[in-house]
Image (tube, rainbow, N blue to C red):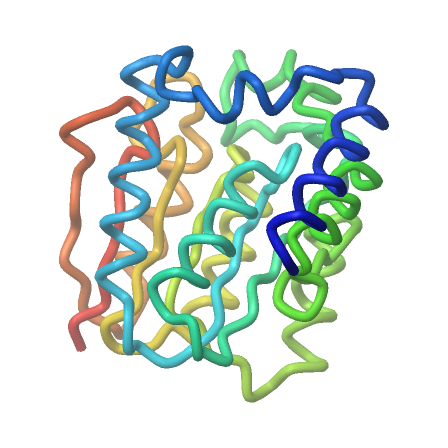
Amino acid sequence: MSSDNFLSNRNRFSSDLGIPKLYEFIDQFSLYAGVHTLGSKLWTYELLKDTVGVPGDIYEFGSWKGANLMFLAKVNSLLEPSSPKNIFGFDNFSGLPEATKEDGDYAMHQQGNYHGNEAILRQAIELFELQSKVHLIVGDALETIPRYAQKNPAALCSFAYLDFDLYEPTRLALSFLDDCIAIGGVIVFDEACTAQWPGETLAMKQYLANSQHQFDMLSNSISRQPTVALKRVA
């Protein structure tokens, strides 16, 4: 896409959103973004950078509005411009599903929160001409993950970002990843080891106890989220 076409398209995009001055803020994002937001993106960038040259696609489990999904796609395009890697985002776009007892009291009152907007995300994917790279897997993760795994037995993952928050979908995502995470691949947890979301922590601990793979565990020292990353070493 030429620079002129992009400027025209992004102006139309911001107009469609009802925020005509959107890019006046985006172009000056570091003026407005908090230290936590910058730290979160910097650590995610470093983790993704560490998987350059590792075979396999990129997966996000829990995409909400798609900001992190698009961040992963754009950074991958910069780090590996000739890479065949695809980016898959799993979400129902209707908010958090019902929690289970493993998720604790706080999660029990969060059903329906974190409601995304699939249409706007698809429009953003089109704006940046990422239709061939970014793929949305829409629906209940308890159904879409097994269906995806069945249809893609040769799937290989170099990087995964888990942001389901809840025990059951996180457990299922990890089960899928155990079959396809490449050596050198990284699994990132957005909420593990936080008091409010014990289900994600429990799913991670059970996974580490049962997986035959070996991992180095990494902790985020510069921002609150993501919290933990696992790098497969064997």
Q: Is residue 202 above or below residue 186?
A: above
The residue drawn where x is 44% and y is 79% is 82
In the rendered view of the protein, which quadrant contains the N terminus? bottom right
**Residue 81: horizontal and vertical position, in percent?**
42, 71
Q: Report the label total.
A: 0
Image quarter of residue 31: top left
The one of 223 and 52 positioned closer to us in this rendering: 52
In the displayed orientation, state which residue is furthest to the front.
Answer: 4
The one of 168 and 152 positioned closer to us in this rendering: 152
Image quarter of residue 91: top right
Q: Is residue 117 left or right of residue 189?
A: right
Q: Is residue 128 left or right of residue 46?
A: right
Q: Is residue 230 left or right of residue 33?
A: left
Whether residue 228 is visible? yes
The residue drawn where x is 61% and y is 31% is 100
The residue drawn where x is 72% and y is 81% is 151
Image quarter of residue 207: bottom left
Q: Is residue 192 left or right of residue 120?
A: left
Whether residue 179 is visible? no
Q: Is residue 167 above or below residue 82?
A: above
In the rendered view of the protein, which quadrant contains the C terminus? bottom left
**Residue 153: horizontal and vertical position, in percent?**
60, 86
The one of 121 and 18 positioned closer to us in this rendering: 18
In the displayed orientation, state which residue is furthest to the bottom.
Answer: 154
The residue drawn where x is 41% and y is 54% is 75
**Residue 107: horizontal and vertical position, in percent?**
57, 19
**Residue 77: horizontal and vertical position, in percent?**
45, 63
